[in-house]
Image: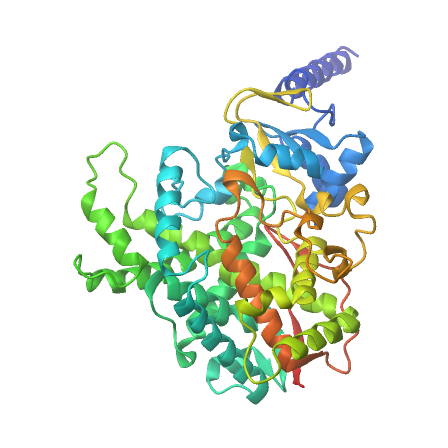
Amino acid sequence: MLVSTSMLLWSFAIALLLYRWLRVANKKPTNFPPGPEYSVPFLGDYGWMLVINASHLHKAAIKLGDFYRTKILGISLSRFPSIVVNDLAVAREVLNRREFDGRPDLYLARLRDKRFNRRGIFFTDGPAWKEQRWFILRYLRDFGFGRRFPEHEAEVNSELLSLIDLLRDGPKYAHEHTIMKDGYVKCPNVMFSCFANSFLQIVSGERFPREECDVLFNAGSNAMLFQRNGDDYGTILSFYPWMRHIYPFSRRFNTLREASLRINEFIQSIIEKYLQTHDPNHVRCFLDLYFKQMEKCTPQEESFTFQLDQLVLGVVDFFFPAISGATTQMALLFERLLHSPHVVERMQQEIDDVVGNGRLPTLDDRPQLPFTEATLREGMRIDTLVPSGIAHRVQEDTTLQGYDLPKDTLVLIGMDAMHNQKEYWGDPECFRPDRFLDANGKLCLAKDLSLPFGAGKRLCAGETFARNLMFLTLAALMQNFNLRQRPSDRLPDLTKRITGVIISPRDYWLRFEPR
């Protein structure tokens, strides 16, 4: 009897201590946005989100927001007090306020670097981020990034002709047989070389010839491994890095780490090739300009950030979305178009009327191809590529819509949620390109409230490049081909997408049938 009483008292004491520890560990700041009162031990509210929808965390956040009747959800992600903004108007406010421009120090970002340092420009902040972002964008523009540049547009045209040749006449080289079989091509992989080469031309002044593009297909496959094995909250490894030593988390960590390092090694090999022949008196490409800046700076300088490792991650931050992000967005759109053949026919008619078939569409044709442009924009809205954006960090104590947010609060923007708000879109579940056209059939930018590339100072630096390249690709393919599935395939289930860092379709095979 005495033993059982003692055990009961010990159990009660342990339970009380655990309760008090959980209350303190997961206590949210005062006047914080509404959210779960009690969190899952060790996991915080990340645990609830895994329970609600482990495969699609952005949908779990929407459900929690609906349950607590709030568009600004307050949650605890381990040591991070966090909010999820699921409203378009509030998201615009957040993205355009300086105090929300920070980036959290997430392990998912660190594991991309061979020494686990914070490098690059997408996942960093502070003076180094400002310096690197300004320099890279300023001098990439000189070679066609983010603006009209005839020489680069000619190179893109050449890449599209090579893609069309593959789709029309079939594979010529061994590596092309892995992405094309019996007239059907693997999506999004078939577009890896076209999109990657279009970016590498800007950085290095050269493209990989078609017979050597196996390295680009390999790089694209590694990029997709990273995109699909991460998640929009940085994975559990960002909150508990030590879990990388425990199975099955170790397997996920190794996949993410190895995929990242392989891409880094590929980019570094390109950089080192140009570094060997660098002449400070002869600028061939963007890399030469960065090399010159490296020579001007010395490691003894307090603000020294121009290093080879930083250049590698800086280039990777642009190469990565070009080879995996933009190509995946196109693959998502092609799936939609299989469900909407009338949209394909209307684009083709528009292109036939404006361009004909004697040349490929150009950016000069864009104003006269409003429905084609609207279709691309509608694709980016209804299939939001990055459903929770890239996490922001509050840089100083501030307020938002009457709530108090302490410094270092993690901020996630529910891009998918706001692109599906009925109060803004009316019928957000419908794929309807006409929503972006006026009564005269012209493109009306005022009607496009979507933010697929974000906004403010953290606006995706590659927006113009991506929009231009995706438009040219869509117009060229619609001009030359019809979309066909295998006879045995059903129409793709648009609800069965993979949510990682980005949303992607499961790999599928598609025939581009010559018109």
Given residues 90 and 392, the one toward you in this image is: 90
Q: Position of residue 198 (x, y in %)?
A: 45, 67
Tell me which residue sits at (68%, 32%) in the image: 45
Tell me which residue sits at (80%, 54%) in the image: 429
Instruction: Tell me the quadrant of the picture where the C terminus can be found.
Output: bottom right
User: Does residue 511 appear in this view?
Assistant: no
Given residues 182 and 441, the one toward you in this image is: 441
Given residues 446 and 233, the one toward you in this image is: 446
Residue positioned most to the front: 440
Tell me which residue sits at (44%, 49%) in the image: 112
- Along the horizontal axis of the image, is 397 left or right of 58? left
- Along the horizontal axis of the image, is 232 left or right of 124? right
Q: In the picture shown, does residue 107 fall above or below 16?
A: below
Q: How is the image coloured?
A: rainbow
User: Does residue 396 appear in this view?
Assistant: yes
Q: In the picture shown, does residue 49 fall above or below 396?
A: below
- Along the horizontal axis of the image, is 323 left or right of 6? left
Q: Position of residue 464 (x, y in %)?
A: 52, 55
Specify the quadrant of the image occupied by residue 503: bottom right
Instruction: Tell me the quadrant of the picture where the N terminus can be found.
Output: top right
- Disc tally is 0
Specify the quadrant of the image occupied by residue 372: bottom right
Q: Position of residue 38 (x, y in %)?
A: 73, 24
Q: In the picture shown, does residue 77 fall above or below 398?
A: below
Q: Position of residue 356 (x, y in %)?
A: 62, 82
Q: In the picture shown, does residue 249 fall above or below 332?
A: above
Tell me which residue sits at (52%, 86%) in the image: 171
